Image (cartoon, grey):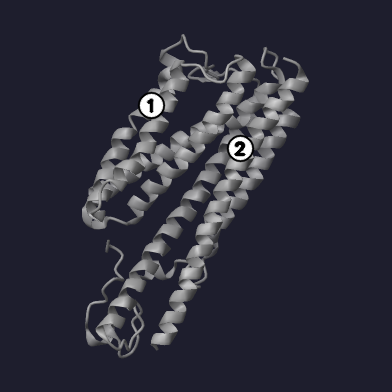
Amino acid sequence: MSIEEAVWYVAAAYAVVLAGVLALLAYTARRTQRLGRQVRELRKALERDE
Amino acid sequence: MTADETRNPCISAVPMSPRERLYSAPALFLWAALVLVAGVLLAFLVAPIDASSMGFSQKIFYFHAPIAETALVAFGVSFVSAIVSLRRGAEHASGVGEQLEVAAVRLGLVFSGLVLVTGMIWGRAAWGVWWAWEPRLTTFLLAVLVYAAYFVVRAAVDDEGRRAVVGSVYAIVAFVTVPITFFATRYLPEGLHPVVITSSGARMEGSMVLAFVVCTAGMLLLLAALLRTEVTIARAQAHVSRVKEEIERRQAAGPAPDRAGVATPGGAAERGEPMEGTGRSTR
């Protein structure tokens, strides 16, 4: 296999790993953000209660 | 609310000790990023190009194999968590054990997906085919399918306590596929998949082993960071849900003078009433 061809395979594999890890981080960040929103809403509800 | 729960950074702003900060999720993410960058640099700048027919495409190995090992470690974590969760019984559903078990299976599946895709690219470069029904690939695919069914099994059970028990039992049984996958290439030698790390040592040069070890450490740190984050989110989510239910319950019952889940003067705690919906072991 030529080096040019091999570079494409390696680049594709590393791109897949990077995309997967970034997707995981984005999903985790989104969940954290959603949780933060819920906590803020809860805090408001508690303040209203008081 | 227990003292442990007030340390939840999503709910409370109680500062962490320096030691806690060192093992916090952001610190673990930072460590993982640093180690992975070092791994990439070692793989491309220090480790030589493979002398075999693989040539430059062998560089895929430095991430493919560590991700595979990390996926198997994640399934191992789910196995241990399942045992811990099961020992505590159904009344401890939604506990840390169960949350860790679910998070480990989920992350194990994500890492397994990456292994399969990078493995297919590797296979195309090394063997000229995207997929081969050889022992390692087949057993790994089988393990992934078995673990994917974990969520189907859990979703089929409505009762939370029973779901936790069924999920834990399934996670323990599913772990049988992990050693089968690991030893498939070692005891079934007719496969295409190479065995690089053997009981007699690594079949690589020292700098290649170093790059591999650093990449593996980085991936394991990433897994630890993600697991820690997942469990923190799950715990905070469960706590928020309980407090929400408590507020709704009190609002439905009439005027609610005290803060739900927090012992305030004149509140339920002072009156000696149980603080429902705030205990750690509730479902």
Q: Nearer the viewer, mark 2 or mark 1?
A: 2
Is B257 displayed left or right of B25 in the figure? left
Foreground of the two, B31 or B111:
B111
The residue that disc 2 covers is A17
Q: Is residue B25 left or right of residue A10?
A: left
CA–CA distance in space, label 2 to label 1: 24 Å
Residue at (43, 55) in percent of width and height: B231
Q: Which residue is mark 1?
A: B179
Expressed as whole percent of the image width and height from the top left, the position of residue B161 reads: 23, 54
Crowd tier of the residue under label 2, counting other residues whose Cα lies within 10 Å: few below 14, some 14–19, many 20 or above: many
Amino acid type at mark 2? Val
- Dot 2 falls on a residue whose secondary structure is helix
Chain of the residue that carries numbered disc 1 in the rendered image: B
Would you say residue B20 is visible in this rendering? no
Q: Quadrant of residue B64?
A: top right
For the point 28% across and 81% down, which residue is it?
B252
